[in-house]
Image (cartoon, rainbow, N blue to C red):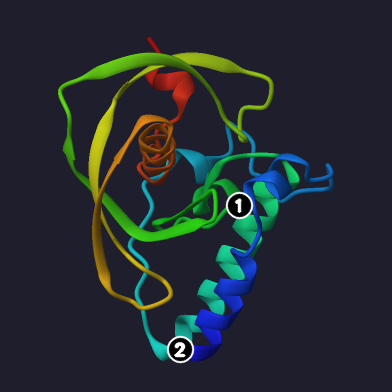
């Protein structure tokens, strides 16, 4: 577990500025209409034996997101149907939105798996999320609002097999 914490900490030591200025390199992104994007993903099962696999998946997700100058990515977008999302310098395992505010707005969204396409998507302005922290394996809960809430909703849609081209306004 300590090795997992060290590797994830070094992985997420990047800054937002590094993400924005990342050079374009070959990525492992799965493009629509690949079946991996259209299936509901399954919960990650933690075990001592799964620590290295989790490190590798999160690392691959983070590197892919940065290489494409993205702000979020889900495991299905690299062909792994597990409930894992990465955004900015954070990772959520088995995230669940258990509350959405009634206040919504419509904004244009893009998607790494739908390059060059943008759709107007209606989303809640605030959400409450529960997830497992990959560093500590603790169950976490937090309220998110604004752009971060939009990113999390977008990535969680991916783990349910929903893409913005299907849910746009």
Residue 33 lies, in percent from the top left, at: 58, 31
Residue at 44% over, 15% down: 107
- Where does label 2 land, which residue? 1
Quarter location, residue 83: bottom left
Q: Secondary structure at mark 2?
A: loop
In the rendered view, does 7 fall on the left or right side of 154?
right
Relative depth, front residue between 89 and 113: 89
Mark 1 nearby-residue class (10 Å; few <14, some 14–19, many ≥20): many
* Up/down of 46 relative to 128, above or below: below
Image quadrant in which the C terminus is located: top left
Residue 102 lies, in percent from the top left, at: 15, 23
Residue at 62% over, 18% down: 117
Residue at 35% over, 42% down: 160
Residue at 63% over, 39% down: 70
Q: Secondary structure at mark 1?
A: helix
Residue 114 lies, in percent from the top left, at: 61, 27
The disc at residue 78 is 1
Mark 2 nearby-residue class (10 Å; few <14, some 14–19, many ≥20): few
């Amino acid at each position: 577990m300590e090795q997992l914490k060290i590797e994830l900490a070094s992985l997420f030591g990047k800054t937002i500025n590094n993400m924005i200025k990342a050079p374009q390199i070959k990525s492992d992104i799965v493009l629509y209409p690949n079946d991996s994007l259209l299936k509901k993903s399954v919960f990650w099962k933690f075990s001592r034996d799964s620590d290295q696999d989790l490190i590798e998946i999160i690392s691959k997700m983070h590197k892919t997101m940065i290489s494409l100058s993205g702000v979020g990515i889900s495991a299905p977008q690299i062909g792994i149907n597990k409930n894992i999302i990465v955004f900015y310098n954070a990772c959520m395992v088995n995230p669940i939105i258990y509350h959405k505010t009634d206040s919504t707005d419509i904004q244009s969204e893009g998607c790494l798996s739908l390059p060059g396409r943008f759709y107007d998507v209606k989303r809640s302005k605030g959400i409450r999320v529960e997830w497992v922290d990959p560093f500590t394996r603790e169950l976490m809960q937090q309220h998110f609002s604004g752009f971060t809430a939009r990113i999390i909703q977008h990535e969680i849609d991916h783990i349910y097999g929903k893409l913005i081209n299907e849910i746009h306004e």
